[in-house]
Image (tube, grey):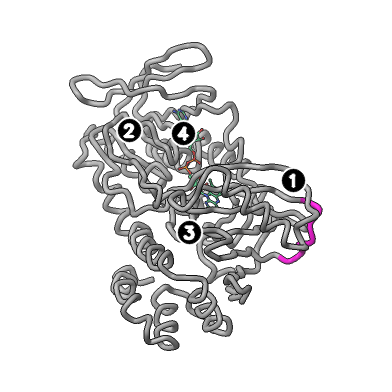
Amino acid sequence: MEKKYDVIVVGSGPAGSVTARFAAETGAKVLVIERRSEVGVPVLCGEGISRKIDDWNIIEGKRWIAGKMEGARIFSPDKTCVTLAADKAGNETGYVIYRDIFDQELARLAIKAGAEFMMNTKAVGLIKQGGKIKGIKARHFDEDLEIYCDIVVAADGVDSKVAQWAGLKTRLDPKDLETCCQYTLTDIDITEAYCEFYLGKNMAPGGYVWVFPKGKNIANVGIGILASLSESGMAKKLLDKFIENDPRLSKGKSLRFLAGAVPVSKPAEVTVADNLLLVGDAARHVDPITGGGLTHCLEGGKIAGEIIGRAIKQKDFSKENLMEYENRWKQGFGKKIKRNYMLKEIMLDMDDKTYNMLADSLKDYNFDELSTLSLVKALVLKHPTLLMKLKPLIKVSKESKE
Ligand SMILES: Cc1cc2nc3c(=O)[nH]c(=O)nc-3n(C[C@H](O)[C@H](O)[C@H](O)COP(=O)(O)OP(=O)(O)OC[C@H]3O[C@@H](n4cnc5c(N)ncnc54)[C@H](O)[C@@H]3O)c2cc1C
């Protein structure tokens, strides 16, 4: 192993691998370090992703696809169903994937582009000289390493230690964090390829229950609840109750259980510093309504890789020079994160009765153009009393043209 790289990426999740690939494609010398022994394992994901990635040229083949979805069904607390076609259904509902294979494919493409991967290697600190970041201190099995580089990428997920070591304020308020758990259930009575979302204050406070089919008679069944409305063990208890009360699922057998957290915050204010970039969950690139982060990780990783490549060529690793990364993602999907954070706050104020009323209004709506703006307009038309509440959202939706 070399002792000096242009770039060290901490974390081999989708954000890390895509950043590594696009930086390596510019000729940069890239090392990815990962504390786990296998890329993508264990899986911590509902495994839903939009079909818009088909057009992105970021992943190859089809091995990572478990199921192609027809669309999404959203159920209000009284079980009124709003159906959305796959191309209108947002970020998490085009495919259900095998996340382990998906992550490994992204890593393979990074390696093909020239990046090196080092597994079983945990970052434990930053090397700093005169206040400047100069590399990573890491532990590889029982060996302590110091590896030097010009740029460190924090792709180490929701609880990014790299960002903390760099002194960036990334602490999440419990109201901006979802506590999640999920079973992969087999032997269930699910045959249709629709991602299902269930809303309700008692069913999933500040979040939702999801059923994402992975094939015939197998599905990821999970729950996310807001940490500020949760207590220890609550997510699993509520999920078990949901499964018990759904005759299609109650006899299912679990192949996998997982628990994790998702940031549902505003876009991170600061995602670059001298010699440092944050990507993916570490940069809070997650949709605050759905908790979906995959598409944004890919988009953000690609921008980060390109800007890093340019900075390496220019030998300028300053915050000012890396700032274009932050400007580009904030001007792109960052606007949607900002708007959906606002929508999340509005939704948190709504009671189950309002959800039922909204679902009833939207159940027969023809979503040939699904945008937040068109949705809000349709709602205000039916319920003029909502205008005051939704006014700020109309403004940001117009700005973000979604
Ligand atoms: C239960 C659950 C369900 C979800 N469902 C969906 C969904 O259906 N669709 C969707 O789009 N998103 C979903 N998400 C969110 C999605 O999983 C994340 O947005 C995505 O994984 C973020 O990718 P990332 O590369 O930023 O981080 P991660 O995938 O978390 O990868 C971070 C990597 O960094 C490594 N790492 C951490 N610290 C260190 C260290 N010190 N040294 C070395 N390596 C380190 C970790 O081991 C890990 O491999 C879900 C999340 C959860 C928890």
Q: Which residue is mark 3?
A: 206
Element at badge 1? strand
Distance from the alpha carbon under mark 2 to that under mark 3: 27 Å
Judge from the rendering whether residue 105 lies leftward or rightward of residue 63; answer left or right. Answer: left
Where is residue 279 drawn, in percent x and y? 38, 43
For the residues bearing labels 1 and 2, Cβ distance under 8 angstroms: no
Crowding at label 1, few (<14), some or many (≥20) Cα neighbours within 10 Å? some
Amino acid identity at mark 4: Gly
Distance from the alpha carbon under mark 4 to that under mark 1: 28 Å
Q: Which residue is mark 2?
A: 164
Distance from the alpha carbon under mark 1 to that under mark 2: 36 Å
Amino acid identity at mark 1: Ser
Q: Which residue is mark 1?
A: 254
Q: Which residue is mark 4?
A: 11
Element at badge 4? loop
Crowding at label 2, few (<14), some or many (≥20) Cα neighbours within 10 Å? some
How many marks the image carries: the answer is 4
Q: What segment carries the magenta color?
A: 186-192
Amino acid identity at mark 3: Gly
